[in-house]
Amino acid sequence: MTLVFETEKNGRLWLGGDLAAHNSKLLAENEIYAVWPAYRGAVPDTPNVYVLETVDGTAACNGDVPMEKIMDSVIDVAALLRDGKSVLIACHNGAHRSSTLACLVLMRLSGWSAQDASSYLATMRNIVDLGSRAPPSRHRTHSKRPLDWLEEVQGQVHPSEAVVVQKSALGFVPLRRKALENGFQVWQFQVFGHPSCSKSKERIFI
């Protein structure tokens, strides 16, 4: 489970797999208020968290989930984060399906493009890969790349008040500050493609 974003009111967006979603102690320790499952196996067992309706990230990318249903949850998650609540988005590994949904939330909060949000997530959780396709299955032989779909729908995701929302979405800055205050180490590494990265960025090991 990886902390990928924090708003001005300390609403934290976490990205993880089903092991995290089913670990009630971990959820409690990190004050997770809500879980948005990106597949049915990531629905938590504990009654102590609010569970949003499951949206399979791969199904969403391939048009199997109405955009209205997806946006209802995106708007709800963004509102929770702005109000200081912490949310975990989880699938099996926390790499593809949940990352697709997390990108939508970041785009809604910050007004970032799909490419910028995807690059940002990849810097925060290095197994994120939205440029690849899901393997063939009995339901689908050819899948759309999540990044391609995110680029298609970004106009529907961005709020009309994007500039205002941007001011409350502080992202990596408060995360870095709090991590350093708690004694975590910071390492320098090269990053390319993120809108705020020119030469090097820092990664917090938590």
Image (cartoon, helix red, strand yellow):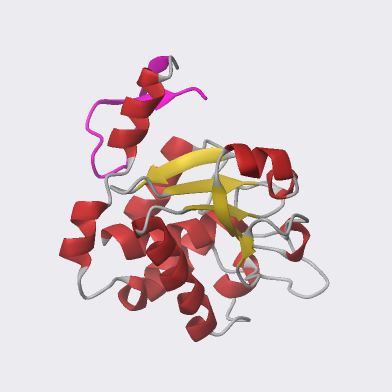
Q: Is 190 drawn above or below residue 83 in the view shown?
A: above
Which residues lie in the magenta part?
185-206
Image position, residue 182 (x, y; %)? 43, 19
Farthest-out residue, front? 48
Instruction: Please determine whether, in this image, residue 29 is positioned above or below residue 145.
Output: above
Q: Is residue 137 left or right of residue 175?
A: right
Give whichever of 57, 177 is nearer the camera: 177
- Relative depth, front residue between 134 and 48: 48
| Residue 160 in the image, given as x and y percentages of width and height | 21, 76
Counting the numbered discs, the total is: 0
- Which quadrant of the figure has residue 25? top right
Q: Pick out the residue farthest to the right.
A: 138
Residue at the (56%, 71%) spot, across then down: 61
Residue 135, given in percent of the width and then of the height, sits at: 72, 59
Which quarter of the figure is the N terminus placed in? top right
Q: Give the residue displayed 48% in from the left and 57% down from the top.
A: 102
Residue 192 in view here: no
Q: Quadrant of residue 2?
A: top right
- At 20% from the left and 71% from the top, the residue drawn is 161
Magenta-drawn stretch contains 119: no
156 or 71, nearer to the observer: 71
Residue 56 at x, y = what percent? 65, 68
Q: Is residue 159 above or below residue 183?
A: below
Residue drawn at x 57%, y 68% is: 144
Instruction: Confirm whether the magenta stretch covers residue 201.
Output: yes
Q: Is residue 59 left or right of residue 118?
A: right
Q: Is residue 26 visible?
A: yes
- Horizontal side of 20 relative to 12 (left or right) equals right
